Every structure is written in structure tokens, then in C-alpha cells.
Amino acid sequence: MRRNVGFELLRTGVAIAAALVIGFIVTSLVSESPVEAFGYFLKGPFTSIRRFGSFLEAAVPLTFTGLAVSLVFSAGQFNMGAEGQFFIGAVSATAAGILLDLPPVMHTIVCLAAGMIAGAIGGLIPGILKARWNASELVASLMLNYVFLKLGMYLITYHLRDPSAGALVSLPLKETSWLPQFTRNTKLHAGIFVMFLVVFLCYYFLYRTSRGYEARMTGQNISFARYSGVPVLTVMLLIQVLGGAVAGLGGAVEMLGIYRRFQWQTSPGYGFDGVIVAILARNNPLLVPVAAVFLAYLRIGADVMAMYADVSAEMVSIIQAVIILLVTAEAFLAGYRHRLTLKEVKQRASAS
Amino acid sequence: MHPLLKAIFSASFAASILRVTTPILFAALGAVVADLSGVVNIALEGMMLISALTGVIASAFTGSAWIGFLAGVAAGIVVGLVLGYFHLKLRTNVILAGIALNLLASQGTVFLLYAAAHDKGVSSSLPSKVMPEIQVPILKDIPVIGAILGKQNVLTYLSLIAVAVIYLFLYKTSFGLRLRVVGENPDAADSVGISVHKVRFIALAISGALAGMGGVHLSMGYVSWFSRNMTSGRGFIALAAKALGRTHPVGAFFASLLFGFTDALSNYMQSLRVPGEFIQMIPYVVTLVVLAVYSGRQLKSGRFSNE
């Protein structure tokens, strides 16, 4: 078991290293001074307190979407809806933050709940389509992402827009709904506590409750789960709703903690990055924040690089794609693992 | 008659359906071929996007639309082979590999666009070419049909021909038979000496080529430029069209027409006083509804056959 963990760590490390090398090669193809550019990319998040702050801030939404995807993947579902759920969660929290009049803490909680419910509905729809009609949750959730994007932009444009602002942004959220920020220099906010609470709850659900066990069993071997009497369809539905709620909550936290008025024109991409987070964390909720920090590091590093060098931030997608491909490739380094096992067996055989 | 209804029943509307169906149809055929060989190809979206950009860049640098077309198709094939390499050789989960390629495509094309055109939005600064529209001699003189089918982009005709070609390939050739056997029962195929990997590699290459043609149509036919994420889910809609078309080329054709119809309808309704967001939502909502209704029927009939 321990050797397995060690091997997985090694595999992940090699995959990340290979991805960075490929990233550097691509950078050197387009840049006049690739070493300098890549230096900005690697050092970027540490070049100022503000950037270090935004690096940690970026890990928060990524943790939420990473958890959402981990939950869904644990049960063997390919619901790609975290993107849309996060977005519609943010829109709902914005609406609740603008339209409702409530006392401080209460208002925050209601806004968070609004985001959660919207996200949960986003999980429920593909879940029902799958459980009731056996429709592919993959295609359904991808379609729903577009629907939520358009619906969200409609609500912001026609009902929540700030007419006095030049750009297309919503009215500011009422102060009573805000999650407080800790310092002046950064936007680190109290949402981080909500995040850790959700990390723990997801872990507790998956590894310490019988429903969570059933979900993981369904993910590992659906036929086995079915024959053992697990209500597979209920479990699938439940896990997609939970995943949606977590992603929606993430969108709400982001609005209340960082932006305080809705200003996205397009989906910010945290949902798909959540897939990478979940893959790196092996769907283990406790590892999700670590993976999210790593991904946030890549994101902010890429932004800093784009600011100071002649390479656009999208370069990072190449690194991300290579990481997904290599980390999930079962045969990647399988030969090495085979030799490792063989060596150990031989050692034991000669020892006895 | 309501002006919208009048528009819908016009020949020019029917012609526009064919035009917007083209990229979806190509990708749906690609989905059919991959699926029948036993591989779920969700990378279609990314393949289309990469081919769309490759076509624009290649045609801009060579000055030839046809070289752009071939480059775009080649790019689709390459992505198909990359997907095959990771899925078949390195045993990556095919859906995760598809997600990775889609991510790479959606951001990577912006990266390349910036490198080639110094613009992150559109490629209009590149002198890219457009695939020609052609008139079919006799067809164009027939009333109604002539207005619909007489003058279209060469790729639209190619997509219609592709339906027949893919049908013949899958159901009337021995390789097509082998491909379907591999998808139906890889172990059985293996036991009679068919190389499952080889067949699936070829299927993914064909799938990529078809998605590539769809992508090229988007940037060099439908419009004359590349813009970021211009596929906007057509690769995923193609997967729905494949499911709706019962994984059959002719079925996929009719399903693609349905999605093309909603797409064309939403284009026509832009002029109405309905918020644009709702109109843009139509194709996706229709896909969701159709997916539910259709899958439900499939499940039921599956149950009956089991009883």
C-alpha cells in the first residue's frame, strides 16, 4: 500500500515535470526570450504580496469545483456540469445579495444557500435524465453548461445590471451579504473557512458514511454494487446533486468574498480546471486543496508571464492537458512499476 | 401568416438549415464511426476547433483554400491519432483524454491565434481563404429544390456525400464489418485475428478527418475567419445527434438536420424582440429535451426486448 502511494506520487511528479518541459518547449517556440518568460511563469505567484494573495484566492474556487468533480468522479459519473453550476451559483448569490434585505450574517448564509440550491439543480437535471431516462450525463451536463451561461447572462443583463456602470456588470451586492476580507493588500476572505468545512464534509461523506461507501463502490464496480443491493440510481442522483451543490456554493463564495458585483462576461473556467484538480487529488477530498493550490499557481504564474513577457497565458493549457493525459494514463511508467514489484518479490524470495 | 412562419417555410430558410447543419453533420458522422468501433470520442469539439484554426492559417500562408482544407483535415486526423495513442497505448480513460484535448484545443487555439495573428479574438487580420460555393448544373434549375440545393458551399455537398460514403464504408465493406465487430465485441474480434488497436486507430483517424472537415467549414465556409471557441458546443451536439440517430450515418443525418433547424431558427429569431440569450439557448435546450425523450424510448425498448 505504501509503495503504491509512493509510486503514485512519483508518477504525478514525473507527469508534472514532463508537462513543464513541454510547456517550456512551446514557450521557446513563440518567445524571443523563453528563459525569462518561463522564469516569470514559475516565480510569478511569489513576486509580490498581492500576487501571492491572488494565488491563494484562486485556490478557493478551484477547491470547490475540484471537490464537486471528485464527488461525481468517485461514483463513476462523468458529469461535466461543474462549470455551469459554479456560474449559475454565482449568479444566484448575486441575485440574493442584491434583491434581499437581511441582517448581516443571515444575508450571507441565504446567499450561500441560494448558490448551493442553484448548483444542486444543475446537478439534478442531468442526474434525473440519467437515472430516469438513461441519457448520457456527459452530453446533458455539457449542454446545460451553455444553458446556464446564457440564462445567467440574461439575468445579469436584464434584471441585475448596474445602469450607471459603463461595462456590463451587476449592481453591487449589499454589504450585509459580503464575506469579510482579512487584509488590505489581498482579497483573502472568510470563504476559506467555508471551503475547509466543505472539504471536511466531503471527506466525511465519502469515507465515513455508508452512502459515501456505496457511491465509491458504484464508481469502482457498478455491477458489483448493484448485486450487493446498492440502490445505484439513487446513489448516482444523490452524488450529482451534492456535486452540483458544492460547485454552486463555490460560485457563491467567490461572489461574496472577492467580486461583490457580478462582472464575468463568460464562464471563468473553474469547472474544467476542477477536473484537473480532481484527477491530481485522485478524487480524495483531503488532497483537493493541495491540488487546487498547484493549479492556482499555474494560473497566476501564466497571468504574470503574459503581463511581462511575449507569451500569452493560454500556454498553461498545454501544461494542464499534458498533466491530465499522463496522470490518468494507466500504462504511463507501468513498466517501471512492474520492475519495482518484481525486484521486491525477488528480494523477499531470496530472503526467505 | 406570421412573418416568422413565412420565413421558416421559405426555400432560403431550408437552404440555411443545410448550411448550419454541415459542421454538425460532419462531426456526427465522426462520432458514429468512432462509436461503432467502441470508442466514445468526446474530443470532436476540440478536433473541430483545431482544424478550423489550422485551415485558416494554412490557407492564409499558402493562398489556397484547398490546401487549407487538407491541412485542417490532417490536423483532425493527428488529434484523432493522439487520442488513440493515449487511449489505446497508454490506457488513459478515453473521456478524460477527450477532456484534456478539448481543453488544449480551446485554449491552445487562442495561444496559436495570438502567435499567428497577434489577436486573441478573431483571425480577420489573416488573409485566409474561403471554400468555394458551387452551383449544381441541372439541380439549380428545378424549382424549390434548386433554391435549396442548387447553390451551396462545396463542403455542404461533401457532407451530404459523406453520409452515403460512410454508410457504404461501414455496412458494405469488409473493413467496415471488422470495425463494427471490434465495437460490438473486441474479444471476439481479437480471437479471429482482427487487431482491435489497429482498427480503432483507423476509426479515430477517420473520426478526426470528418470532424476536421466540419471545423474547416466553420472557419472557411460558414464564416471567413476563425474566432475563439467558435465551435461553441457543436462537437458535443454532434454526440447527441449520434445518440439520437441510433449510431447510424443516415440516422445521424436526420438528427443533425433537427439540430441544424434549431440553429437556423435561432439565427432567424435574432430579429425578434426576444432577449438574444434565450434564442441562443434554443439549440442546447432542444438537445437536452431530445436526449431525454429519445433515451427514454431506447431504455423502454431495451427493457421489452429483455422480457
Image (cartoon, coloured by chain):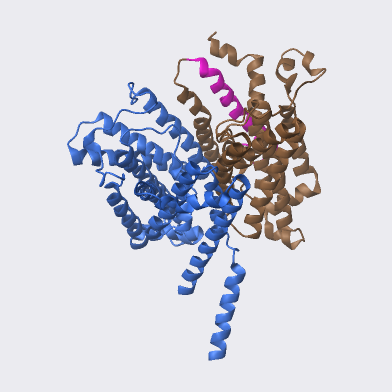
A51 versus B274 height, above or below: below
Identity of the residue drawn at 53% across and 90% down:
A351
B91 versus B166 height, above or below: below
**Bounds of the magenta span?**
B245-272
- Chain identifier, colour brown: B
B262 versus B53 height, above or below: above
- What is the x, y in percent for residue A3? 49, 74
Identity of the residue drawn at 29% across and 54% down:
A197
- What is the x, y in percent for residue B287? 53, 33
- What is the x, y in percent for residue A118? 35, 38
Q: Quadrant of residue B219?
A: top right
> Does any portion of residue A73 appear in the rendered image?
no
Judging depth in this view, the residue of B188 and B141 nearest the camera is B141
Q: Is residue A109 left or right of residue A125?
A: left
Q: Is residue B250 left or right of residue A81?
A: right
B130 versus A122 height, above or below: above
Judging depth in this view, the residue of A279 and B1 nearest the camera is A279
Q: Quadrant of residue A335?
A: bottom right
